[in-house]
Image (cartoon, rainbow, N blue to C red):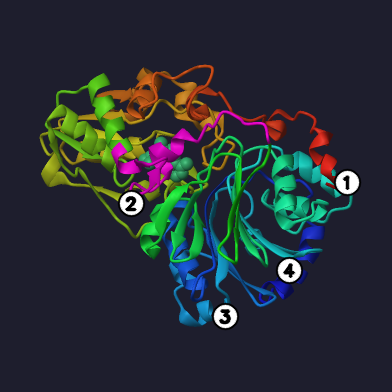
């Protein structure tokens, strides 16, 4: 581990004086991995991360392995800001590697939290990249600290490293499985060891992970769009609760975190907002899914209008579906600047509002004198829609209606999609009519929960066994929320510390 070692030494000193309990880290991330490539892994990992950039824009990191040594480089900023340079990639030797792109909105965004995280264990080094959030991280961390573990980061992902190190499992994959059994919450991991690339998806399958092939090499990524960029063939989704061990020799072994199968409940918000439209989830195009959300919304809540416009970019496919179903012209009422960065993550509401204005401009020539329907994928705090509706009115629109291609978001997420607390969620504290008044629309409607399931081909929602986790809309969380509920941690989760396999 070349570059990180001196950094780790100074960081360790800082960590020992840092507060023991981490602040909540709400991370949206992308992970990638490759093993058995017939050339250098690093440029492929960099390209994969580039395709996953929408999952996290704060920092990126790559770790590779070559001939007994791990090589790592991590930087704050966009993938292309750093991992484009030949001299950077040339230092990351080896034909296997993993990468991570990160977006944390609260908590620390310092370099020490940037992944992949690395540790030397008794069976060799291990590097881990994690997408998702754990719901018992705080509890487990306290338990491990009380047993003598020293944490180097404030990221919940470090638990995987610590727990893997403590496991007495015989092989690296045994150890990783022990760690996965001890944690609760959402995790899609790519793990690099000397001999293997390991992919792990949590038992409920909250965050996505897909498997592909590039020549003889196995590849893993958060989303299939990463395979398109590198020319890899999509093989299949990693199953919820599955551990895929891809050997350097081209072998592939599928294991399970636990023999007990859980009802898979992938996160519905990946389909609504988070995944890139050109990705395929469970064999279905995300773009097509979003168009169907828009169509169903148009059937449920039609409007007499002259034009339908998306709030770009994320509202585009659902607005196309809405326009096609309503037989009304699809136009761009807003022009989006691609140079403004993200507005959602700004910590301060005032700054967030200015950000919306920097990002979108009204297209006066299109909206003047028109009845405009704006379609967006979701409404969270209402910042975007309030600003945009005013902008469109100021540009001369006669009426401005808002249609939202998902149900009202009433509950926070604890699994890695950044949503604010209940107090800040507009739909958590207001009726639809109150929201309409606050955002200043002539009418406002959301896709119904059953409409959402219907559009996804799984409806109506089955209360006992819903096909997705839809906690943002229902409060029905698919795992225990040990940290959030402040319940006692279950000590048996660490039982592997006491017994050898
Ligand atoms: P708001 O302005 O707070 O109502 O946020 C709604 C806008 O943010 C929508 O246009 C969404 O496309 C986008 N959005 C929704 N959820 C997220 C998220 N978790 N992270 C970043 N952006 C989001």
In which image quadrant can residue 202 be found? top right
Element at badge 1?
helix
Return the residue at label 1: 146
In which image quadrant can residue 455 be found? top left
Instruction: Tell me which numbered mark, 4 or 1, is placed earlier along the sequence.
Output: 4
Label 4: few (<14), some or many (≥20) within 10 Å?
some
- Alpha carbons under labels 3 and 1: distance apart: 38 Å
- Alpha carbons under labels 4 and 3: distance apart: 19 Å
Residue at horizontal 73 percent and vertical 57 percent from the top: 172
Element at badge 2?
helix
Return the residue at label 3: 91
Instruction: Tell me which numbered mark, 3 or 1, is placed earlier along the sequence.
Output: 3
x, y percentage for residue 188? 57, 47
Q: Nearer the viewer, residue 95 or 364?
A: 95
Q: Nearer the viewer, residue 313 or 204?
A: 204
Return the residue at label 4: 8
Image mark for residue 359: 2
- Alpha carbons under labels 4 and 1: distance apart: 22 Å
Q: Nearer the viewer, residue 153 or 34?
A: 34
Residue at horizontal 68 percent and vertical 35 percent from the top: 259
Residue 428, above or below 387: above
- Alpha carbons under labels 2 and 4: distance apart: 38 Å
Ligand 1 quarter of the rendering: top left
Label 3: few (<14), some or many (≥20) within 10 Å?
some
Magenta extent: 259-288
Residue 421, above or below 459: below
Q: Is residue 381 left or right of residue 454?
A: right
Q: Is residue 323 something one can see in this rendering?
A: yes
């Amino acid at each position: 581990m070349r570059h990180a070692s001196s950094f780790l030494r100074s960081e360790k000193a800082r960590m020992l004086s840092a507060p023991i309990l981490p602040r909540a880290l709400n991370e949206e991330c992308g992970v990638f991995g490759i093993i058995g490539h017939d050339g250098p892994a690093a440029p492929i990992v960099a390209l994969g991360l580039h395709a996953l950039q929408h999952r996290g824009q704060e920092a990126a990191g790559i770790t590779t392995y070559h001939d007994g040594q791990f090589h790592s480089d991590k930087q704050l900023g966009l993938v292309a800001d750093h991992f484009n340079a030949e001299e950077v990639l040339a230092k990351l030797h080896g034909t296997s590697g993993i990468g991570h792109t990160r977006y944390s909105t609260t908590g620390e965004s310092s370099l020490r939290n940037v992944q992949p995280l690395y540790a030397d264990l008794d069976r060799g080094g291990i590097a881990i990249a994690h997408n998702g959030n754990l719901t018992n991280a705080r509890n487990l961390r306290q338990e491990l600290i009380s047993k003598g573990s020293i944490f180097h980061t404030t990221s919940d992902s470090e638990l995987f490293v610590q727990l893997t190190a403590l496991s007495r499992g015989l092989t690296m994959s045994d150890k990783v499985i022990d760690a996965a059994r001890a944690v609760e919450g959402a995790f899609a991991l790519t793990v690099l060891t000397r001999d293997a690339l390991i992919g792990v998806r949590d038992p409920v399958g909250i965050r996505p992970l897909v498997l592909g092939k590039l020549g003889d090499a196995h590849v893993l990524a958060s989303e299939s769009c990463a395979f398109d960029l590198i020319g890899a063939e999509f093989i299949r989704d990693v199953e919820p609760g599955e551990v895929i061990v891809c050997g350097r020799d081209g072998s592939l072994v599928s294991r399970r975190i636990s023999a007990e199968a859980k009802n898979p409940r992938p996160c519905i918000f990946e389909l609504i907002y988070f995944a890139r439209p050109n990705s395929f989830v469970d064999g279905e195009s995300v773009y097509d899914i979003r168009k169907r959300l828009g169509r169903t919304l148009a059937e449920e809540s039609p409007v007499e209008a002259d034009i339908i416009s998306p709030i770009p970019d994320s509202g585009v496919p659902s607005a196309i579906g809405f326009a096609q179903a309503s037989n009304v012209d699809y136009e761009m009422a807003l022009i989006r600047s691609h140079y403004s960065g993200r507005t959602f993550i700004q910590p301060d509401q005032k700054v967030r509002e200015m950000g919306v204005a920097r990002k979108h401009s009204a297209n006066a020539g299109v909206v003047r004198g028109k009845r405009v329907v704006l379609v967006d994928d979701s409404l969270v705090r209402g910042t975007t829609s309030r600003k945009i509706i005013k902008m469109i009115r100021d540009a001369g629109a006669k009426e401005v209606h808002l249609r939202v291609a998902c149900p009202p978001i009433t509950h926070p997420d604890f699994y890695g999609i950044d949503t604010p607390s209940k107090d800040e969620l507009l739909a958590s504290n207001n009726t639809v009519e109150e929201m309409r008044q606050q955002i200043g629309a002539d009418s406002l409607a959301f896709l119904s929960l059953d409409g959402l399931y219907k559009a996804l081909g799984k409806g109506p929602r089955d209360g006992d066994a819903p096909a997705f986790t839809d906690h943002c809309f229902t409060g029905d969380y698919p795992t225990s929320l040990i940290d959030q509920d402040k319940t006692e941690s279950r000590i048996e989760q660490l039982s592997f510390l006491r017994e050898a396999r």
